[in-house]
Image: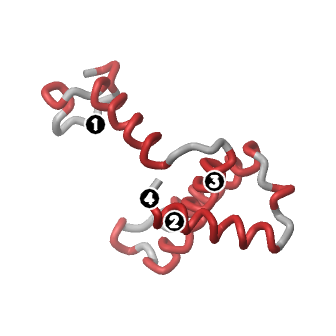
Amino acid sequence: MTEDIKDTVQKLIQFRNERDWEQFHNPKDLAIALSIEANELMELYLWKSPNNANLEKVKEELADVFSYALLLMNHYNLDFTTIIDSKIAKNAAKYPVEKSKGKADKYNSL
């Protein structure tokens, strides 16, 4: 994990622990909170052109999404770079450039 991400996770943990919120941050509740925050992010775009979303609110909701994702990742002692690299490799196999370039089709429809 990069030092920036490690530092950010440590800040999140310190913030959480100072408030005794770790008791609420089990994997199930972190996943639910992550989903709720992602939906709040989507709501900023509802019925608008993508360029009309309030950027300050987008940043706030993205921070919430990333925060819960990082706390969930930390709970399982996962490494950010490792899990992202693994997913990119899996997606590269499912979506070869020659079949998927410029297409939004799911891998089983290519």
Name the residue beneath numbered marker 1: 104
Distance of mark 2 from mark 3, alpha carbons? 10 Å
Dot 3: element: helix
Answer yes or no: do the residues labelled 1 and 4 have beta carbons within 8 Å? no
Residue type at mark 2 is Leu
Residue type at mark 1 is Ala
Mark 1 surroundings: few (<14), some (14-19) or many (≥20) residues within 10 A: few
Give the label, 4 or 3, closer to the camera.
4
Sooner in the amino-acid sequence: mark 3 or mark 1: 3
Give the label, 3 or 1, closer to the camera.
3
Residue type at mark 3 is Leu
Give the label, 1 or 4, closer to the camera.
4
Residue type at mark 4 is Thr
Distance of mark 3 from mark 1, alpha carbons? 25 Å
Name the residue beneath numbered marker 2: 62
Name the residue beneath numbered marker 3: 34
Give the label, 4 or 2, closer to the camera.
4
Sooner in the amino-acid sequence: mark 4 or mark 3: 4
Dot 2: element: helix
Q: Is residue 71 above or below residue 49?
A: above
